[in-house]
Image (cartoon, coloured by chain):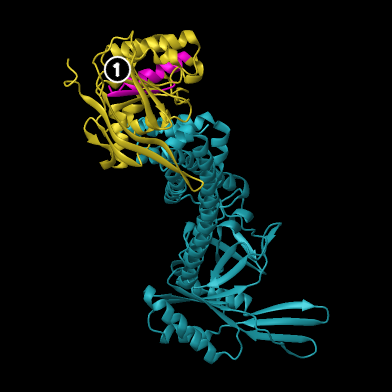
Amino acid sequence: MNSLWRTVRLGVSSLLLHKLRSFLTTLGVLFGVASVVAMLAVGEGASEKAQDQIRQLGSRNVILHSIKPQQEAVSDEQTRILSYGLTRADFERISTTFPGILRTVPVLAAAQEVRVGAKSCRPKVLCTTPSYQDVVGRLLSAGRFILPQDEAALSLVCVLGYDVARYLFPFENALGQRVRIGAHYFDVVGVLIPRGPLGASLANPSSEAGGEIFVPLETGRSYFGERQTTIRSGSRDIQEVQLHEIIAEVGTDEDVPFVAAACRAMLVREHEDKDYEVMVPLELLMRAKETQRIFSIVLASIAGISLLVGGIGIMNVMLATVTERTREIGIRRALGARRHHIVVQFLVETTVLSGCGGLAGVGIGLLIPMIIERFADMETKVSPISAVLAFGISMAIGVVFGLYPAWRAANMDPVEALRHE
Amino acid sequence: MTESDQQIVARLRNVSRRYEMGGETVYALRDFTFDFKQGEYWAIMGPSGSGKSTLLNLLSCIDRPSTGSYEIRGREVSDLTDNDISALRGQELGFIFQSYNLIPQLDVIDNILVPVIYQDDPIPNARERAIELAERVGLAGRLHHRPNQLSGGQQQRVAIARSLINDPAMILADEATGNLDSQTAKEILDLFDELHASGKTILLVTHEQEVGNRAEHILRLKDGYILSVNDVPHAQTSGADPR
């Protein structure tokens, strides 16, 4: 132990004799390790976010969407009607005949303007049933969600998404307020918490993409109908959709692929056009994980190349050092050093070089994600394993790329080495 | 002590060292047979190319004979592995080089300790012994100086202290005063006299007659052969015929 410590001390003091050279040598490893740690943190953060979003859709859910088909609308001279998408019959079939499904939730989206005083926005107005909250896993920050009696009584009540509530009622409690949706006034009975961390949502409630308002399905159907009309100069475009979304909650993960396949088969049979889409969050999750795996392999390859370059740099410098210190090697051999002493001495130097580079690289690699989070508003996730692994690899690089120079040093003929000027 | 009682430190029998140079065989040392005994002080002299350095390299086991047998304290060197020879060098031999050959990044004490760190069984209290040796060779105030902070004479004193750290059987000095001015050279030779007086075996390679005359015996070489073996008349010899 004592002799190893002495060898390490000697290695460090040898390296300090050429500070600039040693520093430049470590840069290769430093950048390699820093890029590994930082890239993995960014990749992991992005993947985690994507996987979270998918999980929020419900990993045991199968989601059916209506999509506008690529076909001409049925038209007369003034009015064009396009009828497409999921139907109430589809919903009934899925709800009643498919085994393995626990619950189904229908969703009808209404394109309505939402207004409170002078403030207006166009969030998604989703007409749905009470079970939506449980199936999709939405949590309330205040009030309640839609109740069965709201459905039965066609109550004019609504539940605001976090963004919409914050936008429409920035300084007051939204609960108990009234909002105008289209031409009708609705009482706010609940406010949801955002899907992301509180306050982190950047969705724009004035666009259709950002913000949600939930109303009872039957209320929505009665007051807004299933038709959406766009008036253009001299004509009217009408889109008729019975249901925009059907969410089926499956009992077990194993049944999810079978239910998805059954839904697809049923929709193919019942729909002439491809006016639907079947989304399986579990499949997306698997795909996201696979993408993450591929991404990790690509990152590892890039990192491997940069570390290889760093390692070659170390080897190059160590070969030059061995030549420069030929006489010293000769002296040490003459004074009793065995071959393995010389090997260890040079290996310690390369390992110290790569270890210092690795340590500094880990430090910088941990700093980069913080800077990215601060200035680029991206989520990153530093995994301790990646830092440990990157540092371990840097040490291994020192050993692997130090072996040849060390071997060359150890196999020098002492007579020749002592003659070296 | 009689001659027969004297212990043989290095025994060479019919040792030759040849090199292949451009398809030709060149002999640096031929059929060399000699014994170096405990406590002797030898000067090995001869002109350039006479085989002095080759003999020293063979004696110090950093080179191996092409033919013949070489024993150090009864151990046949050709039977030893590379590791054994390294260990033997560290334990039994002390080296003093013309150009001092200190390690530039180490201070005086650490340079003196270099032969110790490679020993399987290092001497106890090595650091204290290194300090004691440094003081003995006159470097008491310079223990933590690096070689580039020392004069040539001081560096050679460090080399002498280093050669003594493992209490070797034989000290091999190669032109130890070659790079020194006459006053410093005299001081170094005085140190050798002290070492000899304390019972050390010293083999000093030199081409300077004055330096050779400080030894007990002179072995002259020419073209790889022994030319002559003489006792130095004014020296205090510890035995009669060394062989």
- Report the front residue among A263 and A328: A328
| Visual hue assigned to chain B | yellow
- Report the front residue among B148 and A5: B148
Q: Residue furthest right?
A: A234
B43 with respect to B125 (left or right): right
Q: Amino acid at mark 1?
A: Arg
Chain coloured cyan in this rendering = A
Using the image, determine if residue A236 lies above or below residue B202.
Answer: below
How far from the left and from the top, in percent, is residue A88?
53, 84
Decide if residue B9 is in sight here.
yes
Secondary-structure class at tag 1: helix
How far from the left and from the top, in percent, is residue A32?
54, 48
Using the image, determine if residue A369 lies above or below residue A82.
Answer: above
Q: Which residues are magenta?
A: B153-175
Query: Label 1 neighbourhood size at 10 Å, few (<14), some (14-19), many (20+)?
Result: some
Using the image, determine if residue B124 lies above or below residue A196.
Answer: above
Question: Which quarter of the rendered picture does the N terminus of chain A lie within?
Answer: top left
Q: Residue at x 31, y 21 (%)?
A: B165
Query: What subunit carries mark 1?
Result: B
Would residue A191 be counted in the magenta stretch?
A: no
- Report the front residue among B228 and A350: B228
Using the image, determine if residue A344 lies above or below residue A293.
Answer: above
How far from the left and from the top, in percent, is residue A404?
45, 47
Q: Residue at x 46, y 87 (%)?
A: A93
Q: Which residue is mark 1?
A: B129
B84 with respect to B101 (left or right): left
